[in-house]
Amino acid sequence: MTKHFLAPRARGIVKVRADMSDPKAILAELSKTFEAFKAENDAEISALKKGQADVVQSEKVDRINAEISDLNKALDDTNAMMAALKAGGIGGDVADPAKREHSEVFSKWFRKGDRAIADADLGDLEVKASLTTQSDPDGGYLVPEEMATTIDRVVGTVSVVRDLASTMTISSDTYKKLINMGGAGSGWVGETEARPETATPTLRELIFNVMELYANPAATQGMLDDARVDIAAWLGNEVAITFAEQEGAAFVTGDGVKKPRGILSYDKVANASYAWGKLGYTPTGVAAALSDGSNNGADAMIDLYYSLKEQYRNGATWLTSDVTAGKMRKFKDGDGTYLWGNPTAAGETPTFLGKPVRTDDNMPAVGANAFPAAFGNFQRGYLIVDRFGIRVLRDPFTNKPYVHFYTTKRVGGGVQNFEAIKLMKVATS
């Protein structure tokens, strides 16, 4: 795409120089020129007004005002050009020429589907922009970094667990993590006493595999031809809805088969019998409800609160559905004070027993033997693994006159610290 730089010449007339590729630099230079020109001519107008008013002087004032109007129009045109570039999904990381070039070529391919341009340029540009080390045109092309950020940001807003958990980006299909289970021995000795060998720590390996998640939004070619359509925002919003719904369900209830393993899919045991590899729970004390009308519902939530070790409680959050949160909101302590804390300002999160409450309707409803609430430090307890890059395959043939954008992302997840998350079970024991 040709970009122009507007440079001043004498008396405010503007000429075009095509040696600048950064719209922000164009606007900054033009603004600087305009301010200098306006200051100079304001001074001249003031001097003219001090003299005897005549036709010649009036014409000079009119001419200067006209030149200022021309510069104002040039400034408006530059602003419009920058807006058009942004609407076209181009611009992104202007500080990195390789990423900017990839974004521009990707946008042309996205709108027009010119395979010759894509095959010749996109693969190499993805390497230059540090997006990938492999070119796989038949599998689609990686979206520009700003477009991927748009998608991830919207998904993170909708998917509660993604917002709470730790996330890691990897370049392979598997992430392995070693956990120290303890066991290193130690002891007190005198100055000259022997020091026998102590026990060796036990290590366990956690393996997180990434699975493929896809979306397949469609648009008409007419919409794609419209330069004012923000491609990054359109694709981000379309894809984010599907990705967020699928991810959100998998992170809570996924069985690990072709999807991440969810929090509630692990073996569960009474917290008194907790062992690594299982999640501990505390019972409500009622067979099919959070409370039987007495204070036992609040007592059960307090038991759940203190079942989590102190080192995890500092960053802990309640995770439950909206319906369950409504029941929790009614709980009071022995003095009749509500345990629920309403937010004091817009955008703040409500609290229960002083800890934030986040709702996710993938959490089950209250019912016999259900686990409707979790309390934990999800940042330390649950790990989401994203394989680098979101890939798009343009398909204008399958469903004419629509152009489909088959978008894939590879993601995995699972519990990484079984001590950091505790559950509430609706049961007498």
Image: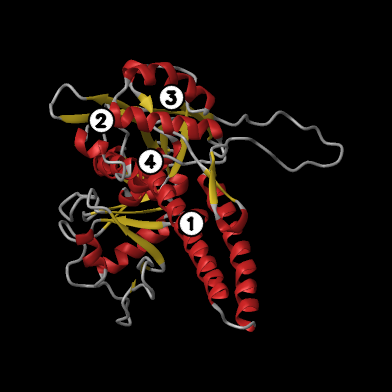
In the rendering, which numbered label is found on residue 405?
2
Cα distance between the residues tagged 3 and 1: 52 Å
Which residue bears the numbered disc 4? Answer: 89
Quarter residue 327 falls in: bottom left
Q: Amino acid at mark 2?
A: Phe
Report if residue 270 is visible in the image.
no
Cα distance between the residues tagged 2 and 1: 37 Å
Cα distance between the residues tagged 4 and 1: 22 Å
Q: Residue 267 in the image: x percent, y percent?
A: 31, 38
Q: Earlier in the sequence, mark 3 or mark 1?
A: 1
Q: For the point 25% across and 59% down, which residue is it?
A: 284
Q: Dot 4: few (<14), some (14–19), or many (≥20) neighbours within 10 Å? A: many
* Residue projecting furthest to the front: 55
Which residue bears the numbered disc 1? Answer: 75
Q: Earlier in the sequence, mark 4 or mark 1?
A: 1
Left or right: where 254 falls relative to 124: left
Q: Is residue 132 above or below residue 291?
A: above
Of the two numbered discs 2 and 3 in the rendering, the one whose residue sits closer to the viewer:
2
